Amino acid sequence: MIGIIDYGMGNLRSVYNTLTFLGFDSVVVADPALLADCSRVILPGVGAYAMAVDNLNRLGFFPALKQFAQSQKPLLGICLGMQMLSSTGSEPSPCEGLGLIEGEVVPMNVGVTTPLPHVGWNSFKLLHEHPLFEGVSKEVDVYFVHSYCFKPKNERDVLCTTEYDNIIFASGVARGSVVGLQFHPEKSQKSGMRILENFCNWDGLC
Amino acid sequence: MSLISIMPCLDMKNGRVVKGIHFTDLKEAGDPVEHAAFYEREGADELAMLDIAATLENRKTRLEWVRNVSAAIRIPLTVGGGIASLQDMEEVIAAGASKVSMNSAAVKDPELVRQAAAMFGSEKVTVAVDARRNPALPSGFELVVSGGTRPVGQDAVAWARQCQDLGAGVILPTSMDGDGTKAGYDLEFTRAISAAVSVPVVASGGAGTLEHFYDAVVQGGARILLAASVFHFRILAIRQVKEYLRQRGLSVRLEG
């Protein structure tokens, strides 16, 4: 069973709808104890980092998600869910993340005339092959909505990068069975669906 | 830079599309799901749906179609029309809308924009700014509400700036002088807004030709191009517009 983590902030419906559309059963998980029954987990996210980790903590998801990641079962963070995989966040003030992929989440340092949040379709450059991107065209665009970005400590954790204005940021991170995507695959049409489908069929190995 | 997005807009009334695609291959003429799916297939980058008769009785119906449409498409959906409170926004977002657009309610209570941004994030909050020309105001554009029927006596460009400062993530300016005329976007107004704010600007109202779309980006400074009639009446196809923009050197989304 695929679990979609509900910590009271994310728009779970679009992720849930897309999985249903692809023919995968999923369950919305608001109780960390139920993670044990999940073969894979999606951590969606909308909103501010600090508030989201507070909610995750309050509901007891911190230890449960760390344990889940240790079990080598596939874990996918989307948007803020990806950012929360990091060690620390800064929105609106410094706070601790899940620490599954070392690094910090910082405001995007774009020029003053560049629109933020970075909203809209943009491309990505895949730095190395990954099962989630199998069959996904390299010449494809995906949908972004964010003002902060994840700076992984180790370059090898960066799965793909995207260029916006004068900066290049990690639009995907991966380590072992844990993957994070800054863009929204559930709103990125065919290519996004392919990525989600790949995730649902992935054994967590690279 | 992020890509230029094409955003067709569907007008809704009592759960039905009232100004929809004039097409015979749609099973049911007014079905919002059919229309939305059609535009997605055509290459739309985002979709807007505007509730033009948003009454209290209509609210329940609205949630139903937002739910159905968002379940059927894999592109972002902006819902506007009659959004009057945080509760309205919360419901529409929970039903699957990616962004919510406010208009009159924000003018009436600007604090609503701040609260919405704090609660749902700036990226969810679009403010539609309707205006008409009035040389008495500093920018030359006066803010109007109630579907363009009631002038407010306030500067529209200053208002857009204020909305951004309050937390709006997208500004959607529409000039009442140009809407529905297919004579082109009001470039002067679009430019005035995009020069005043740093958040993405949606060009809206008046698109009729391929050049209009191009001009909205190059002269108007818009990143998202909204159009209704020109797509409804099949004057242009979405893919044709994107192809044209690409040929003229603008970056548009490639479909995977």
Image (cartoon, rainbow, N blue to C red):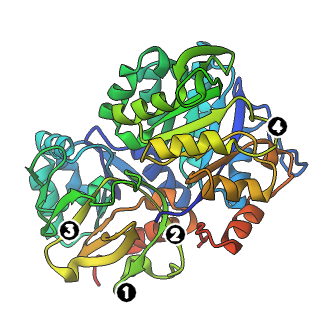
Horizontally, residue B17 falls left or right of residue A198, namely right
Q: How many marks?
A: 4
Q: Please, which chain is the residue tagged with disc 4 on? A: B
Q: CA distance from mark 1 to mark 2?
A: 17 Å
Q: Are marks 1 and 2 on the same chain?
A: yes
N-terminal of the pair, mark 3 or mark 2, is 2
4 or 1: mark nearer the eye = 4
How packed is label 2: few (under 14 Cα within 10 Å), some, or many (20 or more)?
many
On residue B1, which mark appears? none
On residue A151, which mark appears? 3
- SS of the residue at dot 4? loop
- Kind of residue sitting beneath label 3: Lys
- Kind of residue sitting beneath label 1: Glu
Horizontally, residue A78 falls left or right of residue B23, namely left
Residue for point 74% across, 58% down? B238
- SS of the residue at dot 1? loop
Q: Nearer the viewer, residue B53 or B136?
A: B136
Q: Are marks 1 and 3 on the same chain?
A: yes
- Kind of residue sitting beneath label 2: Asp
N-terminal of the pair, mark 1 or mark 2, is 1
Q: Which residue is mark 2?
A: A141
From this view, report whether residue A107 is shown above or below residue A8. Answer: below
On residue B181, which mark appears? 4
Q: Which residue is mark 1?
A: A129
Q: Where in the figure is residue B53, as x and y percent of width and height?
A: 68, 20
